[in-house]
């Protein structure tokens, strides 16, 4: 009887043959995330990676999720710092969530704070892409700040369902109350919405390539800046962890500003940082409440079941979630926000 890995490889081989995709061999890549399996396609010329969704973080049906992810790669790769899309493996009985074929990127993991300037330049290249006439299927709310506040508020409903202490819940709700109702400037651009440092590879030429794209939307660039440099992001990835100083964070923001034609105010950047942190904290509460559920046999939208992912990864995520939802970690980020308001 084939192992689960052997079965996945056979399914992918059959799907590639049906799609008449030429390749020389397949190599499974390490299971390091909650949303995709990855397979390396060795090909004559340039290698590709097959991204096979385990779930939809956008809570979309399989075909809609695949179209959304394809649009993310098509749009973001125009900036020159993201893999190009080469093909789509359709949803089928064998591949219930389909798959994407994208550039394979040879590179090392980002090292912080040294690689922050490269990452800032990559984000600037993404944020300066022209807005399309038809943004669909990507999200493009008319008021991106209000949309962010609403998304965080919806996730915050999980705080009371995650078996957290009343003190931690009160602290998070105080931070939610501190979010401004409106922003002085809220210009939209293409953002990744998932720019923690583990999602970047640094090539031999020194480019930072954003390799994981599935949540892109037209929103506020301050969300990407925050997601790259917050404590809850820089200490998230198993293989790329660092605690940034306030000077590191300020230098990162300033390097990004130097590569942009126009930038939001400091007030807007700090508000986006608080909102992104709260998005992460409320996601942690949601995962804490849901990860022990059985996986979704119908392969529909979101699915945070621990059954879908390697045990070591689940243990790492559980450790991070518990830490980020602790009073000490909340106080650490809160204090940084207070200092950043004056430093920027």
Image (cartoon, rainbow, N blue to C red):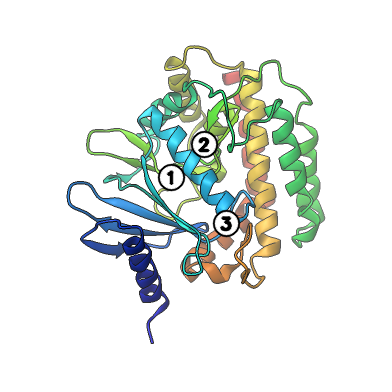
Q: Which residue is mark 1?
A: 199
Nearest to N terminus: mark 2 or mark 3: 3
**Residue at 63% of width from left, 31% of height from top?**
140
Does residue 214 show up? no
Label 1 Cα neighbours within 10 Å, binned few <14 / some 14-19 / many ≥20:
some
Quadrant containing the N terminus is bottom left
Where 264 sits versus 204, above or below? above
In the image, which is nearer the foreground, mark 1 or mark 2? 2
Quarter residue 138 falls in: top right
Q: Which of the labelled discs sits on residue 317, or is there none?
A: none
Circles 1 and 2: CB distance less than 8 Å?
A: yes
**Residue at 38% of width from left, 48% of height from top?**
87
Quadrant containing the C terminus is top right
Tell me the element at label 3.
helix
Tell me the element at label 1.
helix
**Residue at 43% of width from left, 45% of height from top?**
199
Give the alpha-carbon distance from disc 2 to disc 3, as whole Å. Answer: 20 Å
Residue 326 percent location from the top left of the image = 67, 53
The number of discs equals 3
Looking at the image, the residue that sits furthest to the left is 44
In the image, which is nearer the foreground, mark 2 or mark 3? 3
Q: Which of the labelled discs sits on residue 192, or is there none?
A: 2
Nearest to N terminus: mark 3 or mark 1: 3
Quarter residue 230 falls in: top right
Give the alpha-carbon distance from disc 1 to disc 2, as whole Å. Answer: 10 Å
Q: Which residue is mark 3?
A: 62
Quarter residue 39 falls in: bottom left
Circles 2 and 3: CB distance less than 8 Å?
A: no
339 relative position to 214: left or right: right
Give the alpha-carbon distance from disc 3 to disc 1, as whole Å. Answer: 23 Å
Tell me the element at label 2.
loop
């Amino acid at each position: 009887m084939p192992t689960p890995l052997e079965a996945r490889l056979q399914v992918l081989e059959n799907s590639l043959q049906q799609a008449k995709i030429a390749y020389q061999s397949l190599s499974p890549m390490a299971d390091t995330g909650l949303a995709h399996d990855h397979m390396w396609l060795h090909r004559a010329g340039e290698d590709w990676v097959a991204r096979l969704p385990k779930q939809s973080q956008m809570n979309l049906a399989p075909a809609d999720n695949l179209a959304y992810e394809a649009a993310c790669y098509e749009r973001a790769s125009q900036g020159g710092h993201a893999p190009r899309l080469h093909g789509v493996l359709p949803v089928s009985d064998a591949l219930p969530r389909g798959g994407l074929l994208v550039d394979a990127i040879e590179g090392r993991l980002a090292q912080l704070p040294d690689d922050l300037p490269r990452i800032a330049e990559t984000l600037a290249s993404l944020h300066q892409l022209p807005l399309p006439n038809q943004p669909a299927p990507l999200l493009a709310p008319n008021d991106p700040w209000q949309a962010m506040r609403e998304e965080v508020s919806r996730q915050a409903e999980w705080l009371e369902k995650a078996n957290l202490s009343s003190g931690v819940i009160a602290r998070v709700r105080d931070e939610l109350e501190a979010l401004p109702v409106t922003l002085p400037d809220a210009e939209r651009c293409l953002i990744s919405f998932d720019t923690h440092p583990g999602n970047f590879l640094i090539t031999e030429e020194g480019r930072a390539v954003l390799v994981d794209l599935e949540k892109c939307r037209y929103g506020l660039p301050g969300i990407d800046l925050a997601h790259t440099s917050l404590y809850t992001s820089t200490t998230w990835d198993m293989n790329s962890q660092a605690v940034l100083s306030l000077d590191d964070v300020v230098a990162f923001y300033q390097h990004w500003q130097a590569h942009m034609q126009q930038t939001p105010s400091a007030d807007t950047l700090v508000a986006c940082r608080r909102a992104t942190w709260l998005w992460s904290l409320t996601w942690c509460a949601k995962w804490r409440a849901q990860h022990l559920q059985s996986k979704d046999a119908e392969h529909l939208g979101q699915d945070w079941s621990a059954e879908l992912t390697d045990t070591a990864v689940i243990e790492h995520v559980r450790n991070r979630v518990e830490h980020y939802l602790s009073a000490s970690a909340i106080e650490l980020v809160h204090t940084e926000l207070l200092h950043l308001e004056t430093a920027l």
